[in-house]
Image: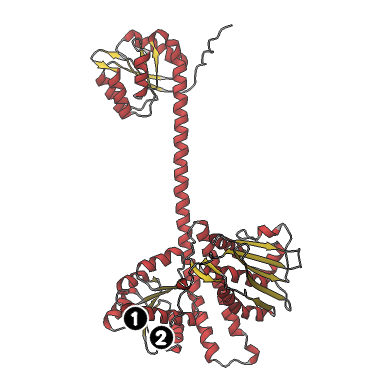
Amino acid sequence: MSSQPPAPQPSPQAIKVLLLEDSAFDAELLAEELRAAYPRASLDVVQDGEGFAQALRRGSYDVILSDHELGGYSGDEALALAREHAAFVPFIFVSGVIGEDNAVDLLKRGATDYVSKGRLSRLPLVLERAMREVAERAARSNAELRLVAAKEEAERANLAKDRFLAVLSHELRTPLSSMSFAAHLLEKVATVPPKFGELLPTIRRNVALEARLIDDLLDISAITTGKLGIKPEVLDMRDVLGQVARTSQEQSDQKNVRLVYIPATEPAWVVGDDARLQQVVSNLVRNAIKFSPAGTEVRLEGHVDNALGQFVCTCTDQGVGMKPEALERIFGAFEQADGEVSRRFGGLGLGLAIARFLVAQHDGSLQAHSDGPGRGATFTLRLPLVQAGADVSADRPAAPAEVENAGKRVLLVEDNRAAAETLGLCLEDYGWAPVHVETCAAALAAASAQPFDIVLTDLGLPDGSGVEIGRALSRRLPVVALTGYGAAGDKSATTAAGFVAHLVKPADPAVIHDVLGQALQSWRRGAG
């Protein structure tokens, strides 16, 4: 029984071969072996270094065959030249003088393989292996190129998506600002017949709802790209829950749902982002009220579990409840308990996904429980407490002192005239003296022509970005952003440009008033 491997069958592949051989007889033998294995092969034969160099410059080859000893030229020189000009083309020595020792050295320097002229029958096997390696290398290279292209395309798509969401946010928030400011003013000065008394609060509530939907879209986008972060400080969760209970009262009254808040009986110090934790708890309470029928109760309760070292917050309702299989699904983006709930109550299904992500960022947990449809639900938030003995007093921000702002001049930069007019009226109502301009150039010209105490500017302006206003003026007076651009990158840009605060539209006029006052106070304190 023969132990020889079967001879390879002739390949239909058309290959182009360059042969460096100064013996016509040996070249003819090689040509016969080559064409027996590759009937469609084309062969260029050169006999010296000059011809070899010209051939490499002239054409592209699938494989190079070379003798090692040539008159006036060596295979070593040929290998070096081939690796320089055709680095990925297989280079096979066909020689009668190569031994094992120098063969290993040649392979280390880049030769693909070698064949002894006394065993030319090996040539088809060596060629087949070399061509297979070339094909595999080409496949890997193509795969790598496709991966790089796919990564670049994904990055371009992400940038396009971020740009779209940023523009969408700005375009939606600006008209919402106008409605919010107008509703605020009318509630203060207009006499509305009792029959229509709920119209203005309804407008204000729906503006806030639309703004939350925009925030959720931006937050879920930031989560998927790893750009949603937190700003930790030491805080008492009783303050967080108390604030949420106060701001949620109007929604519960409007829905005729009784909101019961039971605070923790002892301080509940945690390390967290105040605004983000309010967002989490507010989401739980809003959902509970939303999914509760009139006449029922929503219970928000906090307590300290010293045994586990945790603050525990529970939000319990008597609403629609959930099936067991929905308890985890509701924390997925764009998910709700079931289709019927989605049709009845609406919403994007983003709030709980964002809430759980934010809780995880605080090293906490957020779980849901329900005894079934129609039997209500309980959401339990757990956060690690600050270790005993930690000095928390220095970390708590001091309450801002009241600042007399009457008559303080505000340079208001806003290209939407309706929003500017209503905001200007709101600022005047709080005692400020706004001067309105619509462009970056007009803002810089106004700041040069007359004194101002503070600047309140949009970012998306017709002739550029309001960030440039901050760069130009922030050393002279405090600059606050009021804009529809609220992504993390936008806030980082304003901070880097010297802005003292960044408000996202639609902001409540009372909040704008407070932020302007605090910014002016901080500026005076720093200047003093």
Q: Residues within 10 Å of mark 1 (few under 14, many from 20)?
A: few
Q: Quadrant of residue 61?
A: top left
Depicted 423 relative to depicted 164: above or below: below
Depicted 370 relative to depicted 458: above or below: above
One can see residue 336 in this view: no
Looking at the picture, how far across and down is residue 164, in whole percent? Answer: 48, 62
The N terminus sits in image quarter:
top right
Q: Quadrant of residue 95?
A: top left
Depicted 112 relative to depicted 447: above or below: above
Looking at the picture, how far across and down is residue 149, in whole percent? Answer: 45, 45
Depicted 418 relative to depicted 124: above or below: below
One can see residue 220 in this view: yes
Horizontally, residue 343 falls left or right of residue 55, namely right
What residue is pinned by disc 1?
Answer: 524
The C terminus sits in image quarter:
bottom left
What residue is pinned by disc 2?
Answer: 403
Q: Nearer the viewer, residue 402 or 33?
A: 402
Q: Say which amino acid is labelled 2.
A: Val
Mark 1 and mark 2 residues within 8 Å of each other at the beta carbon: yes
Q: Nearer the viewer, residue 285 or 161?
A: 285
